[in-house]
Structure formats: structure tokens, C-alpha cells
Image (cartoon, grey):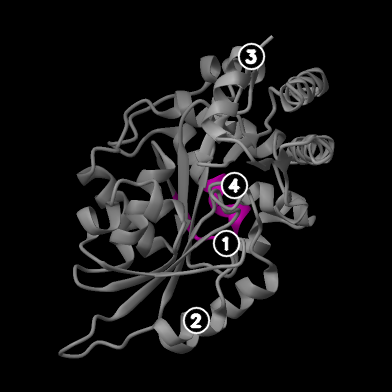
Amino acid sequence: MIVDLRSDTVTRPTQEMYEAMVSAPLGDDVLGDEPTVAELETLAAETLGKEAAVFVPSGTMGNQIAVLSWTRPGDAILIEQDAHILFYESGGPGAHAGVVTWTLPSDNGAMDPNHIEDRITSPSMHTPATKLLCLENTHNRCGGTIIPQEKMRAYREIADRRGVNIHLDGARIFNAAVAQGIAAKEIAQYADSVNFCLSKGLSCPVGSVLTGPADFIQRARQHRKRMGGSMRQAGVLAACGVYALRNLVERLADDHARAKRFANELSELPGVHIDMATVQTNMVMVHTEKAASDWAERLYDDNVWCFAVAPNRLRCVFHREIDDAKLEQAVCVFRDLSVS
């Protein structure tokens, strides 16, 4: 039995999703008459408390379209130094939007509001105008950590005072919401635009949704077209998103519980260390005394798959396809390897 902890992107559709795909009414989204895509976009906007939404093929495209839609070439954006937009999107802000990127350190993904305020620049003959603050909640490279609501509120106050928009890379915003026992719109209220992934913990095969004000979404649609992201009978995919938003959000708590159980078990093993304060949602960062790449190779040989994300750090991600039996199998393999 393979225990695939590489990412929550490996989740496959549920049987109900397959059935929804088969029965979904279809049209042509490029021509504006795709009913199932329209249903998904309306539901997504309502769920996050935004005016409108647009369905995009990937989270990366959604984030890059957001940067394009809020800025002009030569503007500046502020972003956490290990953010997905910066680290995993192939230099998109510079390549697509032509923006200057200022990076800031953080405490598990949460930047210091004072550092943000100090780094905002006004347009002049010498300095770019800071137009956008990019946030990530939960934060991938920090291990699925949550930006506290009080920090989100502080960011909003600064942005309003300084005339800066906020884009939230909320790829896993529903993990953040479920973990805090709040609705996703309570997090989204502090951002002008929010992008979230359907293809991670929500188990959809493909797709993300970018939400925000109606005029922003209209600009986003044009950028989506320009980037080749407009799709035709996309309702086949959107049907999965509709099902997921209505049925699979609350179950994310099961992934969080298993991640914490896994972390507790591994914290007692020799040769590894886990900062339990960072185990907040569905990820566990396992710090290894020996090379993480060696650990990953040996784990793979024993049918436990995970990524070495740093020289001495493994990332293990829990999702719908990891049940209690697979959790125990992973713990047993880690236990055996730790003493071998």
C-alpha cells in the first residue's frame, strides 16, 4: 500500500465528482454561456464574500493574473520572502507584470505589520509606487501555518491608509478557516482579491478560482484570455468544484487531526525533530539530522512518499486519501528507519 504524502494535489475526484462531471450541463465559457462554470464562480464569490469570480486552470495562473490586474509595469509589490508567488511561480511577477518585488521575512508566514509599513514606497522620480501587498494563508513553505486574524486585520488597516491593495494567495484558505473554526469569508474580508485552489485538499482534478471586485474580475478575464487560460466546456471540471465547496470543506478537519497525530508520533523518534507549533493544518515539516534526501529515498523504497524540501527537512502532507491505516503505516516506516 502506497502512502503518498507528497502533496494534497495528488487527491483524485470522489465518485460523486465523477457523477457530477457526467451530468453537468455544458456550454462554451469563452463565449460566456457555460452554466456550470457560472454556477461555480457565483458560489465561490458568495463563499468568500466577494462580488465576482473567475475560474482558472491553476493557482499559479490565478495569482499571476491578480498581480497583473492590480499593477502596471514598474510598480512595486510587497511579499513574504518564501511565498509561493515568489518561490514557485517561475518568476511570474517580473516576467508577466514587470513589477519590482520587495521581500520581507516573517514569523511562520506572518509578516510584521511595521516592516510592511516601512517598506511601502510612494511614486517619485526615484522610487516605484507600491501598489500591492501579497499574502499567503496558509503558508506552504512554513508548513501550512496560518496568518492570525489580528495580523490580517492589521494588514488591512495599513493597506487602506497607504492606498495599497491586498491579494491573498489562499490556495488553502479553507484549511485556515476550518482550523480556526471560522468561515473562509472571515479571512477573505481583509483582502481585495483571493485566489483559492480546488485541486488540493478539496480533491478536484484541476482548477482554481480567483475572486474579487467585479471590475477587477473583468480585467482578470482579459488577462486569462491573453495567457491562454480560457477554456471551452470547462463545466466538466467546474462541476467538481461546485460539489467540493458544498460537501468537502468541513472534512479538512480530519486531515488536520491526522497530521497532528503523525507529528506527535514522530516527535518521539530519534534522528528527527518537529516544531509542533507549526503543525496547524494538514502539513508536517520533519527536520532530520541526516540528509533529508536520503530519508526520502529510503521512505520511498518502503512505499511512503514525501518530498525533501530542504537539506534537512521533509514535508508530509495529509489529505482525503490518507486514512488511519495509511497514517499508521507511515509512522511504522519512520519508526523502523529511525533506528536502522
Residue 44 falls within the magenta-colored stretch: yes
Placement of the C terminus among the 4 image quadrants: top right
Question: Which residue is painted at 55% across and 27% down in the image?
Answer: 294
Residue 199 shows up from this direction: no
Residue topped by disc 1: 109
Q: Amino acid at mark 1?
A: Gly
Residue 112 in the image: x percent, y percent?
Answer: 57, 77
Is tag 4's residue or tag 1's residue first in the polypeptide sequence?
A: 1
Residue 293 in the image: x percent, y percent?
Answer: 52, 30
Give, as a single range, the part of the protein colored magenta. 42-53
Q: Quadrant of residue 282?
A: top right
Q: Secondary structure at mark 3?
A: loop
Label 3, label 1: how far apart the Cα atoms are: 31 Å
Label 2, label 3: how far apart the Cα atoms are: 44 Å
Q: Are marks 4 and 2 in contact (CB under 8 Å)?
A: no
Q: Are marks 4 and 1 in contact (CB under 8 Å)?
A: no
Residue topped by disc 2: 115
From this view, report whether residue 102 is shown above or below residue 323.
below
Label 4, label 3: how far apart the Cα atoms are: 26 Å
Residue 296's disc number: none
Label 4, label 2: how far apart the Cα atoms are: 25 Å
Residue topped by disc 3: 303
Is tag 4's residue or tag 3's residue first in the polypeptide sequence?
A: 4
Q: Residues within 10 Å of mark 2 (few under 14, many from 20)?
A: few
Horizontally, residue 143 falls left or right of residue 31, namely right
Residue topped by disc 4: 172
Q: Nearer the viewer, mark 4 or mark 3?
A: 3
